Image (cartoon, rainbow, N blue to C red):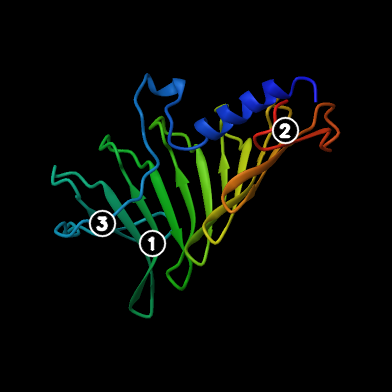
Amino acid sequence: MRGMGAWVWVAAVVAGTALGCASPRNDGKRAAEVTIKETKGPSAQDKQEMSIEGLLIRRFDLNHDARADMLKYFKVQNGAELLVRKEFDLNFDGKADVWKFFDEKGNLYKERVDYDFDGKVDSINYFENSQVARKEVDLNFDEKPDLYKYYEKGKITKKEADVNGDGKIDYWEYYEDGKVDRIGVDRDGDGQVDDWQKAGAEG
């Protein structure tokens, strides 16, 4: 397992950078992974409008600065309003940073997040039964995912990453009960693991 130490270092970078950490594009500003809660008190602005998709938009001012920082989009059917999307402006700069999408039963199924507030999506999170099932993260800022994280019942089970940037997965982490169990590396680019290392083993 020659050179495994370097790949273990890469694993640490992947794990630490994936979600919630600052990137060079943000000039040192940090945006932690957040759980958004709608506080009591703010009400929809009186003016309502229709989006280009034909959805009803309601605007909310959560920090009481007279500017909307949460938008809700509704599909109107037979007089009933069905929530299909929410948008949040976390840093109050007038641009959305989080987009949440809901199915016809009102369940969250997808979330897009811009962690460093540069206007580009850094992570797309997918949900099943309101629990995260998969996260696709753009680590090198080319607007394409290069880290994939898989979950079961809210616990992470696997990570896959394209470390060398060639568009193919070459790094794997498998988890048991939420903890890393083994690490695999593809060194020759054939899509197959060449080296395995158990968590905690010296390489």
* Left/right of residue 66 with respect to residue 165 in the rendered view: left
Instruction: Tell me, yes or no, if residue 142 can be seen here.
Output: no
Q: Residue furthest front?
A: 201
Judging by the rendered image, the residue that carries numbered circle 3 is: 38
Amino acid on which the number 1 mark rests in the picture: Leu
Comes first in the chain, label 1 or label 3: 3
Residue located beneath label 1 in the image: 55
Residue identified by numbered label 2: 167
Report helix, strand or loop for mark 1. loop
Q: Is residue 21 above or below residue 100?
A: above
**Residue occupying the point 64% across, 48% down:** 175
**Quadrant the C terminus occupies:** top right
Please state which amino acid type lies under the numbered disc 3: Glu
Rounded to the nearest angstrom, the CA distance separating label 1 from label 3 is: 21 Å
- Identity of the amino acid at label 2? Gly
Q: CA distance from mark 3 to mark 2?
A: 38 Å
Q: Is 127 located above or below residue 187 in the figure?
A: below
Looking at the rendered image, the quarter that the N terminus falls into is top right
Q: Nearer the viewer, residue 87 or 74?
A: 87
